[in-house]
Image (cartoon, rainbow, N blue to C red):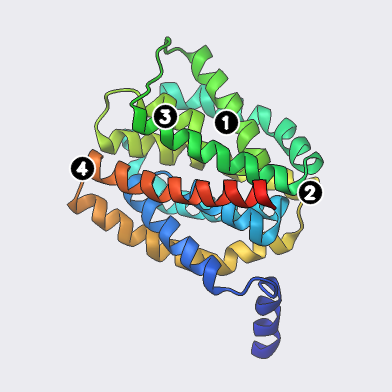
Amino acid sequence: MLADAGGWIAALFVETGVTIPLLVVIVAGLMRGFAGFGSAMLMAPIFAILFGSADMVVTVVAIELAVSLQLFPQVRRYADWATLKPMSLAACAAMPAGVWLLASVDKALIVTAVSGIVVLFVLAMWSGWTWPGPRSAKVSAAVGAVSGAMMATTSVGGPPVLLYLLSRRDPPHIHRANIVTYYFLTQFLLIVIVLATRVAGPEALLRAVVLFPAMVVGAWIGSRLFAGLASEAIYRNVALVILFATGCFGLARGLLG
């Protein structure tokens, strides 16, 4: 039985090996536990190249959901529910359209798109750009709808939500709580939709199960770092440097083939 299980697990990574995915997930876990964001943006370009775009979405979102389940009890009392409820409902409503795009668009184009989104997000954050418009339930819902469609197509639905939420002058623990809570409220439905429509198979979910312990370890270490070094400048800039490098790599790979 153990030998069969070992062979089955190895088959999930037969073309790529397991070392690179494990290292990526550990670093992503550190970022998620410390900054509250960035893990999906780190994993998505690399996993799209390694596993394919559809499998990437399920694997990344399943890992993210597992971490959200771990972090949500710690942060829920700080979350801004008035903003997060319409945003999350709209995101879930937009996911079927994103899944349709996932099934229709070429893998190389998705690698390029997700990498470009990551690079643009980092540049926007570094430039100090903030959301200049009004804040209301309708605006929050519109941001959520864009995010939900992006999440279903690329697994990276964070940029519009992050730029919207982080532009408020809230303390770091509020930002972290809102981001963790948003992912917690949206990711389960996306996994169900992608698997139910057979855009990706159960192997993508099983791969997430194998990689999940590495994410837990990374997120736990990252959350301890956050507790000791709760500096907005530190956690944001470290995450952005890593994301920028990853986005540039994926963008080059997608454009050059």
Alpha-carbon neighbours of circle 1 within 10 Å: few (<14), some, or many (≥20)?
Answer: many
Residue 57: x and y in percent read 65, 49
Which residue is disc 4 drawn over? Answer: 231
Residue 249: x and y in percent read 53, 52
Which residue is disc 2 drawn over? Answer: 199
Which of labels 3 and 4 is toward the front?
Answer: 3
Distance between mark 4 and mark 2 Cα atoms: 41 Å
Distance between mark 4 and mark 1 Cα atoms: 27 Å
Give the amino acid type for the residue marked by disc 2 in the picture: Val
Q: Earlier in the sequence, mark 4 or mark 2?
A: 2
In the rendered view, tell whether residue 196 sits above or below residue 125. below
Residue 46: x and y in percent read 58, 56
Identify the residue at image location x=25%, y=55%: 225
Give the amino acid type for the residue marked by disc 1 in the picture: Ser
Distance between mark 3 and mark 1 Cα atoms: 16 Å
Q: Earlier in the sequence, mark 3 or mark 1?
A: 3
Secondary structure of the residue carrying numbered label 1? helix
